[in-house]
Image (tube, grey):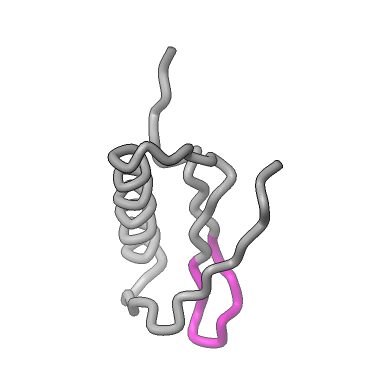
Amino acid sequence: MIEKVTVPDETGIEKSNLDDAKFAAIAAARDLIATDIIAGVPIHGSYRIEIADSTRQVIHIVRFDNVIDFRS
């Protein structure tokens, strides 16, 4: 059972457009995944990074299982 935990990023980063924000979120997700791999921590594909606008409305979601190409 995976416990649902929300970790808010109060500072965040500002990007001028959604494409730049998506690129930054994908890079951040890959960095978090790499850190977990090195630490031997299980990776959960359902983890995600939410991109929000200036009103904190979520406008896009980057799921971890969509940023890594897993092959068997």
Q: Which residue, as the protein is rendered here, is positioned at the far front?
A: 40
Quarter of the image with the C terminus in it: top left
Residue 61 horizontal/vertical position (percent):
54, 57
Q: Which residue, as the protein is rendered here, is positioned at the far right?
A: 1
Note whether 40 is above or below 70 in the view shown.
Answer: below
Q: How many marks?
A: 0
The residue stretch that appears in magenta = 51-60
Residue 17 horizontal/vertical position (percent):
36, 71
Quarter of the image with the N terminus in it: top right
Name which residue lies at 54% across and 50% down: 47
Q: Is residue 46 left or right of residue 39?
A: right
Name which residue lies at 50% across and 38% down: 65
23, 35: nearer the viewer = 35
66, 16: nearer the viewer = 66
Residue 64 horizontal/vertical position (percent):
47, 45
55, 8: nearer the viewer = 8
Note whether 1 is above or below 71 in the view shown.
Answer: below
Name which residue lies at 39% across and 28% down: 69
Q: Which residue, as the protein is rendered here, is positioned at the far bottom?
A: 55
Residue 44 horizontal/vertical position (percent):
53, 41
Question: Is residue 53 located in the magenta-colored stretch of the structure?
Answer: yes
Question: Is residue 42 located in the magenta-colored stretch of the structure?
Answer: no
Name which residue lies at 33% across and 42% down: 39
Note whether 8 is above or below 61 in the view shown.
Answer: below
